[in-house]
Image (cartoon, grey):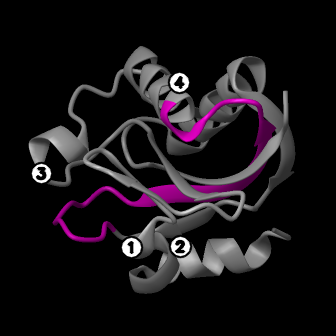
């Protein structure tokens, strides 16, 4: 099977956010693919919703054999196992979260369906913290 290079962005603003990111990275490595690169953690205010909880965010580059849809299903399973109850795609609103994992880039493909868009336009073009993290990667 071929290996795909994937860029993920992770964020957490509930509980011990730095530990939540660490656990998510461990689960990604154990069940999804090889960690190629991990950025430093940056702290940011919530975007597109109001909260007093500051986010911790990182970017990862991984190698995986999964297809985009299989990767998304695996990521959603990790989010649920870590205690994320509400998904932004289904709820249509942003809220505080234990963990959020977004697929930003997947090789050089363009993929659009009702529940997944690659590349992730908001992270690439509209969110300053995302662009800062992506600049730290060597994709």
Q: Earlier in the sequence, mark 1 or mark 4?
A: 4
Q: Is residue 66 magenta?
A: yes
Q: Which stretch did the figure color magenta?
A: 46-69
What residue did someone put label 2 on? 130
What residue did someone put label 4 on? 74
Q: Residue at horizontal 31%, vertical 66%?
A: 46
Q: CA distance from mark 4 to mark 2?
A: 22 Å
Q: CA distance from mark 3 to mark 2?
A: 20 Å
Q: Earlier in the sequence, mark 2 or mark 1?
A: 1
Q: Earlier in the sequence, mark 3 or mark 2?
A: 3
Callout in the foreground (4, 2)? 4
User: In the depicted view, which residue is nearer to us: 45 or 33?
Assistant: 33
Q: CA distance from mark 1 to mark 4?
A: 22 Å
Question: Which part of the image, by quadrant, shows the N terminus?
Answer: top right
Indicate the position of residue 58 as horizontal and vertical percent values.
63, 57
Q: Is residue 51 magenta?
A: yes
What residue did someone put label 3 on? 92
Identify the secondary structure beneath mark 2.
helix
Q: CA distance from mark 2 to mark 1?
A: 8 Å
Callout in the foreground (2, 1)? 1
- Name above or below for residue 83 compared with residue 89: above
Q: Residue at horizontal 20%, vertical 60%?
A: 51
Do the residues under discs 2 and 1 have CB atoms within 8 angstroms? Answer: yes
Q: Residue at horizontal 41%, vertical 35%?
A: 15
Do the residues under discs 4 and 2 have CB atoms within 8 angstroms? Answer: no
Identify the secondary structure beneath mark 3.
loop
User: In the depicted view, which residue is nearer to us: 52 or 103?
Assistant: 103
């Amino acid at each position: 099977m071929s290996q795909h290079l994937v860029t993920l962005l992770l964020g957490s603003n509930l509980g011990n956010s730095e530990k939540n990111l660490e656990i998510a990275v461990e689960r990604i490595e154990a069940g999804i693919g090889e960690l190629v690169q991990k950025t430093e953690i940056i702290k940011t205010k919530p975007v597109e919703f109001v909260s007093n909880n500051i986010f911790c965010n990182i970017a990862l580059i991984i190698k995986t054999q999964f297809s985009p849809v299989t990767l998304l299903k695996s990521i959603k399973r990790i989010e649920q196992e870590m205690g994320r109850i509400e998904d932004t795609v289904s709820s249509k609103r942003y809220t505080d979260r234990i963990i959020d994992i977004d697929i930003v880039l997947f090789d050089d493909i363009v993929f659009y369906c009702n529940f997944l868009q690659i590349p992730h336009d908001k992270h690439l073009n509209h969110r300053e913290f995302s662009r800062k993290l992506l600049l730290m990667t060597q994709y």
